[in-house]
Image (tube, rainbow, N blue to C red):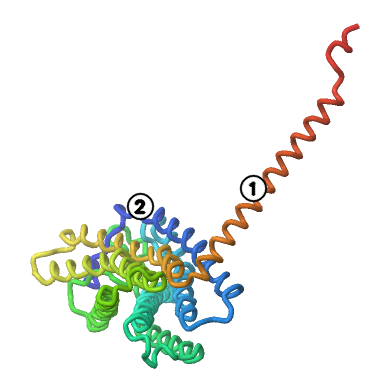
Amino acid sequence: MNKSGFCLFDGQALTPLLPLLLILETGVGIVGNGVALWIFCFYLKPWKTSTVLLVNLALADFMLLLALPFRISYYLRHKDWIFGDAFCRINLFMLALNRTGSIFFLTVIALDRYFKVVHPHSRINSLSVRQVICTACGMWTLAIGLASMILTESHLFPNQTQDALTQCDSFAISMYSASVSYWYYVLFLVEFFVPLLVTLFCAMAVITRLHKRDLDKQTRIKRALVCLCVVVVVFVVCFLPSKVTRIAIWVTRASHEADCEGLRNLDNAFYFTVSITYLNSVLDPLVYFYSSPTFRRLYFFKLWKTFKKKTVTGVTDLRTRQSEDTTIASERPANHLLVQ
């Protein structure tokens, strides 16, 4: 434990795994969300209200992908932050903003599907694109307000085992109470469990509605249900593990029997599950895929077109090389003519 009362660890157990995981998440996320934004911006016009929500979800993911390379460097250096206090705050702010923004927009996408299936005549389904854009701006404002707590205090700590190293973490385990950290941790949990309950309610309501009306074989209705299931999977796989691990740390610390060494394994587990949180940038393209049939058709068309172009180019190059080889062979003198 350092002089400030925080349990800090050097992250030796995390170093072999986390950089590789973050690199994979960054690479796949850039491809998936890059293709999605390309299709949204240049091919899906005019936008529908659902498209506005999907674009904002993709933007939240791109914010994460801009911040992850610095976390990769951080873990590769055994949790040594070299970019200064200001950028540490900004980096952690971007990570928190992605988490909050993604949860918000995933929840609203689930609500959008819920109202379209369960309450098809609701006035909410008649909102214009401009109104949905204004709603999205309000959600971003709320997300920024919630995440901005990270900017109010420093998150740099000297490493417990090597004083020459400096750690940059927003969830360092404090053995004492801290008002700012307390409220930040509460928001960390509330911003997840309330949207999760809303999303589960939407999914169950849609399933119940479909079975009562025997509509589960209609393509449009099935697509809405699959989209809701994908949203629930993203919530459970990406966000739930880190929340459960954080609660375990709180319970262990509140027992007054744990010291820093006793919390080491939980701390490592927490930072691993936080890295799993970043998988949402990899899985969110599935939400785009199942939300919009037009997006799905364009995605397959662009993929097929790119593959066909590469195949044709490869065949052309092969034929060119074969033709050149044939020409060289025809110009080469026969062996028996060289015998005198």
Which residue, given by chain and number where applicable, does mark 1 sit on? 311
Quarter-wise, where is residue 107 in the image?
bottom left
The residue drawn where x is 58% and y is 81% is 46
Which quadrant is the C terminus positioned in? top right
Which quadrant is the N terminus positioned in? bottom left
Q: Residues within 10 Å of mark 1 (few under 14, many from 20)?
A: few
**Residue at the outermost top position:** 340
- The x and y percentages for residue 43 are 60, 73
- The x and y percentages for residue 328 are 82, 29
Instruction: Tell me which amino acid carries mark 1.
Output: Thr
Q: CA distance from mark 2 to mark 1?
A: 36 Å
Frontmost residue, 289 versus 95 = 289
Quarter-wise, where is residue 14 in the image?
bottom left
Image: 291 above or below 187: above
Instruction: Tell me which amino acid carries mark 2.
Output: Leu
2 or 1: tag closer to the N-terminus = 2
Which residue, given by chain and number where applicable, does mark 2 sit on? 17
Q: Secondary structure at mark 1?
A: helix
